[in-house]
Image: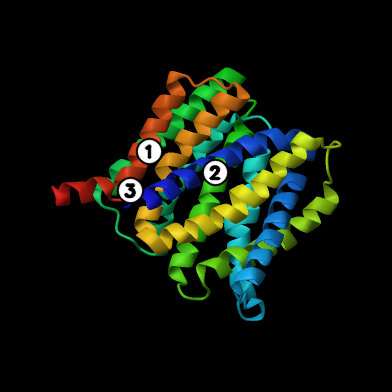
Amino acid sequence: MDAASITRLLLLAAIWGASFLFMRIGVPAFGPVALIMFRVGIAAAFLWLVARICRHALGLRRNWQHYLIIGVLNSAVPFLFFAYAAQSLPASLLAILNATSPLFGAVVGAIWLRTPVTGAVALGLGCGLAGVAVLVGHNLTLTGNADWPAIAAGLLAPLSYSLASIYTRARPGLATPFGNAHGSMWMATLVVLPLFLLAPVRHAPDAGDWAAVSALAVVCTGAAYLLYFRLIDDVGPTRALSVTFLIPVFGVLWGVLFLDETVGRHTLLGGALILAGIALTAGIVGLRRQAA
């Protein structure tokens, strides 16, 4: 991986890690549903503009069902769950919970695609489960079980991401990566719109709230997709997915720097166990041993 690709990888991790920061800033004023309505709506408009400039055909009539499934599983559902969880959970914890997506993916892949579960994968799942137990158990001890719905939402979101990933792996070639991003964002907007009509903006947002939701939509969603697809073209999907290891690092960092969040030993231990679990389930440890 050359210096330019490493720079893009770090930038993408920093951007996606910041999404939890912006959700924490915007959700008190907008509420979870309105926040995500603006996120997917503005992102869809941004990607439409890029498609017009770059002349990318969407193929909506042919692929609308495909876009709908991805839009629900990869955007609407996980975004809403994370926005709900962001009302009470710190950005650092949300970023670490987000990293469990590959762990869920290993389980879903074993069930759906009948992918064999090797010893390394089983060990990785055990490490990941232990990490989640440390994080969840410590947080519920501090809050007296008051935050269990938020934690459940924070775990259902990466589960939804994993379902979307397995679905796209099982149905390759239906659309281009950019088409998947663009079409799914419009479908996510249509799915969230009825909920938005029932749960409008909670309070009058100020300039900071609008700045947060704009950054969340344009930078953390629209531009991040473009950066991710460029990274896939440059280094391939396997190396591009290494961004999963860096997102929690930046998520924790932004929470500490801008939201004055504290990171205790339980958070560090739980996060380390989850990242170790991801490494094992992704076969990274095994690959290094083969290379040696």
Mark 1 or 3, closer to the camera: 1
Mark 2: amino acid: Ile
Category of crowding for the residue at label 1, using alpha-carbon neighbours closer than 10 angstroms: few (below 14), some (14–19), many (at least 20): many
* Residue 151 position (above or below residue 291): above
Residue 238, quarter of the rendered image:
bottom left
Q: Quote the CA–CA distance across marks 1 and 3.
A: 10 Å
Q: Quote the CA–CA distance across marks 2 and 1.
A: 19 Å
**Residue at the image point whose x is 20% and y is 47% from the top:** 288
Nearest the eye: 129 or 242: 242
**Residue at the image point whose x is 43% and y is 19% from the top:** 265
Pointer 1 and pointer 3: residues touching (CB < 8 Å)? no
Mark 3 or 2, closer to the camera: 2
Residue 65 at x, y = what percent? 62, 73
Mark before the other along the chain sequence, 2 or 1: 2
Mark 1: amino acid: Leu
For mark 2, what is the residue?
A: 15
Mark before the other along the chain sequence, 1 or 3: 1
Residue 106 seen: no
Q: Quote the CA–CA distance across marks 3 and 2.
A: 25 Å
Category of crowding for the residue at label 2, using alpha-carbon neighbours closer than 10 angstroms: few (below 14), some (14–19), many (at least 20): many
Q: SS for tag 3?
A: helix
Nearest the eye: 169 or 254: 254
Residue 88, quarter of the rendered image:
top right
Mark 3: amino acid: Thr
* Residue 95 position (above or below residue 46): above
For mark 1, what is the residue?
A: 275
Residue 147, quarter of the rendered image:
top right
Mark before the other along the chain sequence, 3 or 2: 2
> Which numbered disc covers residue 281?
3
Q: Is residue 178 left or right of residue 48?
A: left
Residue 286 at x, y = what percent? 22, 49
Q: Is residue 112 left or right of residue 75?
A: left
